[in-house]
Image: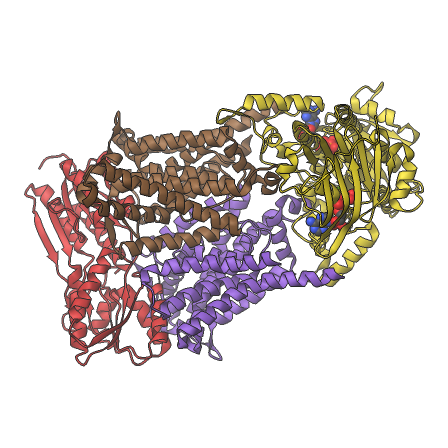
Chain colours: A yellow, B brown, C purple, D red
Amino acid sequence: MGHDLAPVLELRQVSRSFGPIEVLHGVDIALQPGRVHALIGENGAGKSTMMKIMAGYQPPSSGQVALDGKPIAFASIGEAEARGISLIHQEFNLAEQLTVEENIFLGRELHRGPFLDKPAMRARVRELLAALDCRVPPERRVAQLSNSDKQMVEIAKALLRDTRVLIMDEPTAVLTRAETAVLLRQVRALRAAGTAVLFTSHKLDEVAEIADDLTIMRDGAVVWTGLAAGMDEHGMATAMVGREMSDLFPPKDSTPGEIALEVTGLNVPGHARDIGLTLRRGEVLGVAGLIGSGRTETFEALCGLRPGSGRVRLFGREVRINHPWQAQALGMCYLTEDRKTRGLLLQKGMRENLTLQALAKFDRGLIDTRAEDRALDQAIADFDIRGHRGALVGNLSGGNQQKLLFAKTLLADPEIIIIDEPTRGIDIGTKQQMYGFIRRLAAQGRAIVVISSEMQEVIGLADRVLVMRHGRITGELAGSDATEEAIVRLAMGVAVSAPQQESAT
Amino acid sequence: MTDTTKAPIRLSMSVIGPVLGLLALIVAGALLNPNFLGWDNIVNVLARSAFIGIIAVGMTFVITAGGLDLSVGSMAAFIAGLMILVMNSALPALGVGIPVVLLGMAVALAGGLLAGLLNGLIITRLGIEAFIVTLGSMGIYRSLVTWLADGGTLSLDFSLRSFYQPVYYSGILGISWPILVFALVVVLGEIVMRATAFGRHCAAIGSNDQVAKYSSVRVARVRLMTYAGLGLLVGVATIMYVPRLGSASAATGVLWELEAIAAVIIGGTVLKGGFGRVWGTVIGVLILSLISNILNLTDFVSPYLNGAIQGAIIILAVVLQRESKAGT
Amino acid sequence: MTDTTKAPIRLSMSVIGPVLGLLALIVAGALLNPNFLGWDNIVNVLARSAFIGIIAVGMTFVITAGGLDLSVGSMAAFIAGLMILVMNSALPALGVGIPVVLLGMAVALAGGLLAGLLNGLIITRLGIEAFIVTLGSMGIYRSLVTWLADGGTLSLDFSLRSFYQPVYYSGILGISWPILVFALVVVLGEIVMRATAFGRHCAAIGSNDQVAKYSSVRVARVRLMTYAGLGLLVGVATIMYVPRLGSASAATGVLWELEAIAAVIIGGTVLKGGFGRVWGTVIGVLILSLISNILNLTDFVSPYLNGAIQGAIIILAVVLQRESKAGT
Amino acid sequence: QEAETRVIGVSIPAATHGWAGGMNYFAQTAVERLEATYPQLDFVLATASDPAKQVNDIEDMVATRKIDALVVLPFESEPLTGPVQNVKASGAWVTVVDRGLAVEGIEDLYVAGDNPGFGRVAGEYFAKALPEGGKIVVLRGIPTTIDNERVEGFQKALEGTNVEILGMEHGNWNRDDSFTVMQDFLSKYPQIDAVWASDDDMAVGVLGAIEAAGREDVKFVLGGAGMKEMVKRVMDGDAMIPADVTYPPAMIATAIEVTAAGLVSGAPVSGQFIIGSVLITPENAANFHYPDSPF
Ligand SMILES: Nc1ncnc2c1ncn2[C@@H]1O[C@H](COP(=O)(O)OP(=O)(O)OP(=O)(O)O)[C@@H](O)[C@H]1O
Ligand SMILES: Nc1ncnc2c1ncn2[C@@H]1O[C@H](COP(=O)(O)OP(=O)(O)OP(=O)(O)O)[C@@H](O)[C@H]1O
Ligand SMILES: [Mg+2]
Ligand SMILES: [Mg+2]
């Protein structure tokens, strides 16, 4: 396959400003048919912005978009779509109250006469989802789906269109390894069919696996572009971050202290049964499992975010938690995996979001806004949040939103922190910082649970790993036993011996 | 697995909710007065529900798409006034007969459509809250009809009225026209909501207009069409209303907007948009009509307290729904 | 760096919008009638704005937190009726004097608080749409006051009224009590909205109640408190209202709810919740009061058309805001 | 006497302002009294907040209560004409109160107030009380035919006098609205000699506004309808309320009583009873003072 085929879609010296701030400075990129082009860069580097410009969601402030070599200005998203360009958003772009089928066909419904051809649409949806190994019924409302299923719906929505150019903004951020494999299989099929694919991810191994071409961005400019084969993962990381990367994971050097959390017989109706676990101060407990294994629901129930029953002891004291504020008052906080609908107020600024959970700390009758500003300064420094201070959180880049969410939860100063998918959409440099941060929290004597679908993360970060499957804990792994293979076995239910010791403790 | 068995149950409970409320009222009515289930009473109640009902069907679309229209009551009064004026002044030229009635109907439909379009255009083009726009136009239409009637009542010429009256009072097989038209509007509305792209687009816009926009839905146009459609249905309702009362005044259609919105919400449509069902609205309209019908059947309470009972039943009817929903 | 200069400009334009609308009205009023800017007229307009204004401040919180209350007008009428009944019946025992007035005030405050709590409890505990609950309680309170008054008017004992009247008519330095209390409520409201955790929580809940819940905000309690606070403020407004004419009837407070909601939204608070500003509400209230004041002071239009002009100005006032907002 | 119960339907507008409230009160007490007196009579009383609701009520009475007689005070004449005609066609006795129907000869009995007369009596009073002429303002009711008739009668009576109407606004038969309107009238006109409030509820609001403004130029306020507090003030010789014009809400009770008596005795009284509006003055006020009425 020739690298010098005529590009389908190009950006030529494109700049883009929001108000007075320029976030893209004269970038070039060219997508060729039948090739997968990966775009990587730090959070806030301008990847999503670039993709939106290519798909007609936003016009460039200056420079050109060229389709088949000819400059073009898309009048609407519809026009770009009509020309075969579709974009899968980084943030979910689904109407929550509508069903899967309604969302996938939104704006391009199939008709039979004046009426909708529902059977045909449903059949097509089933087909599309089956190709993605996703078993969600088409009639299910999107609001009831897990994040990964939503992502699959997004992908199905894009695949439905006859695309010449498919642009995917971090499609794998919410997917597990297995689901990612399914997606990459689809991408290869599209590539073989001659589609040009543009793809971003912060998971560099995927990039190395799938990409033909590679563009690396930093601070709104392209810093490297060329054949993907010319760059290994380490090189990518270095080029992205602009410095030499050391070990991703910090040493596990904290020592477990008293028992902080003890759960027995926790049942979450419809999602999990008979969950038992213990967690000590200074410990990082990883929770692994396939998507849909009930990890999120288990810990949400533990924090009073959904109904559940069971015995919970915090620092030796038996407690009943029915509401999240009770959990927080007892020193336990849950950081949601769903930053857009449950984590952040997208229509508000950074400051309001940062302090929402810990507002009591700033409440001196009136809110001490100076103290809030100081807290924001601190959070921006600690987590390297990039973006302009006055911006609405909805306008921050995805990764920066995630960092803000992290900062927000930690501001409440919980003793027990449950973090669901902590590094979703975070670039590799910041990931390293956040891992260091989590470790330091543990070293301060806090107890931490990390729920993650990234096997590497669980293994690299946690002292012990619990594996869940179908709403039950199927095993615990510690130290060198915690290997990817062992986790996968437990998660898939093919373990030789699934030790049930967890529920006994 | 448990999911697949769960979904249908929940669905059917949310369906049963409003129906149960309605049934409870019917049983109460039948116990209070044997004539309640008489043919006459049933026809009366259905026919009078038709005005609000037809409007409420249109309102279901507006609300589903995340909008609101407070002006429908005044709009109906204004259109009725206009229609009467036009018919009266065309009478000498056309004489009593079908042409003048058709002219009146055309005026009502065109007037409704225009009024709805106007609301919709201000809302979608200027991007102003529907609440404010329609509150404003509510005042405007109410004022205009008062002005047209010179503070009094506009009445249809009496001979013309006798000619036109069958449009309210007669029908086919003992079922009067308003009922037939209402039924037709409901069936069409249900089909449009469930089985056409327009219905889906309304729900999508009400759910998240950004998403709808990104999916190439013509958001402004769909919104505009919901208001225009509602206006048209107000015109249809007025066509049925005028032969009944033969007049229009400042007191015509007062608080219809509140009744229509209440019917829509009692029926299970979400006030903030994103989900709507036309059949639910019908149940809502019937519940509201039956409450006042039942209050007329008995006289054990002071008429001063009618409003209190009505209010309490409205809340109860909805509690019933939510309870049964929560119960699953 | 350029950022920090931009934000204030946008802010100031959205601030200037409603203020501009208000100024335009004031200029129009001054041109149309020289007495418009007279001290008496200013005091009149401010004092009569106070009732709706005090209620609208409470409504700002309810709407900001994503709720709605249609019952405030009827609630005010009911509380006024109750207050008059209690005061009249305590009169023989307590005699004309401060104790009986204090008793009346206590009844109003307690009644308002209870009524608000009741609305709030049904809405938050049973999870029913605020629209339906408060539509129901609107009917209930309206009915109850009619019933209390036996269809007529409840009047405060004449001697008591003369004693109580200064609460409406007199004040400090020529500024009457309603204006002072309104100002106090506004200042407190503005502080609570902008600078306290409660205000932040209201905005967070209205913006996205899921996020608020996940952020450990006590969503149900905050919601409940907005309704209870509104009820309390309805009580305060009633305390100012009763001494004015010393009576309450079924006609008291009709459509106050619509006026209060309109004021809130004209002031820039978002009907679907998430963002509210108390000072904007004040501007909204003043715009509404001034429109009818100006229409009364001039007579170039048929009084039948007052409503039309009012409606048009309301829409225009908001267009002005949005345009200037969009302009930045 | 036959044992068969006969049903009388009474349909009236809801108590949304003072006069209507009084009328509601008299209707209810009449019904209670007559039910006690005539065990063979059954009454249905319905109040309506708009003409359409009133038509519903009447339809319900026919369909479910099989009424033998209807006493109706139409919300508005035009819309009620057809439905009442239908009642008549069903064979029931029809008594119309206060507002005549648009078609003559439907009702068996007509008990009516005299709206043009109401305005005329008020106008004549102004002409007499302000012989040198003067500047007055007028508060009108809710825009309706009734209000139009009254104001026309008033204006006609003032023709040829020097009484000048400075302005008219709608106070909607409402105390608060008329308070506001009067405040604004006082700001607008430096000299107002007298006010025709055209209704006693509105007079209460007008008096409140005048008192608050401390204006001495307004010599008197003329209300109307005969609210007990106002009649009392006339009786007491209050200079601000020197007179009142009757429009008795009790006419509904008269109508119900006559209808009931006719139905029971089998010798129905048909015809027209016009209850004219008269001027209440300190001399005759005692005859119009009903301390027990809510109005
Ligand atoms: N609508 C907007 N208004 C203002 N600023 C914006 C807007 N959209 C994006 N930005 C800013 O543009 C910059 C680039 O954002 P972009 O979303 O393209 O980053 P990204 O490379 O996709 O980052 P991530 O990896 O975190 O997704 C960020 O600083 C962001 O805050
Ligand atoms: N055994 C099961 N069979 C069918 N559906 C299941 C099962 N277990 C869970 N689910 C559904 O899968 C969805 C996702 O569950 P959940 O969010 O708990 O997964 P998770 O382990 O937290 O994964 P993630 O957070 O990565 O999405 C839920 O809607 C849940 O009801
Ligand atoms: Mg991005
Ligand atoms: Mg999860």
Which percent across, then down, holds residue B317? Answer: 44, 37
Drawn side of residue A470 relative to residue B307, left or right: right
Residue at point 19%, 67% (across, down): D155
Ligand 2 lies in which image quarter? Answer: top right
Say left or right for A374 vs D227.
right
Indicate left or right for A439 with C50 as reference.
right
Outermost left residue:
D267
Res. C93 image quadrant: bottom left
Q: Nearer the viewer, residue D63 or A30?
A: A30
**Which image quadrant for residue B312?**
top left
Residue nearest the viewer, comparing C284 with D37: C284
- The quarter in which the N terminus of chain A is drawn is top right
Query: Can the viewer see residue D9 in this picture?
Result: no
Residue D51: give x, y in percent of width and height.
27, 47
Quarter in which the C terminus of chain A is drawn: top right
Q: Nearer the viewer, residue C154 or C182?
A: C182
**How many labels, in total?**
0
What residue is at 14 percent from the left and 70 percent from the top?
Answer: D284
Residue A140 at x, y percent in the picture: 60, 28
Instruction: Give B322 or D271, whichever is nearer the viewer.
Output: D271
* As drawn, B311 above or below A208: below
User: Which residue is drawn at the image coordinates 36% and 61% (left, top)?
Assistant: C306
Residue D246 falls in image quadrant:
bottom left
Q: Residue at x 53, y 66 (%)?
A: C20
Residue C66 seen in the current view: yes
Where residue D210 appears, as percent x and y from the top left, is 33, 75
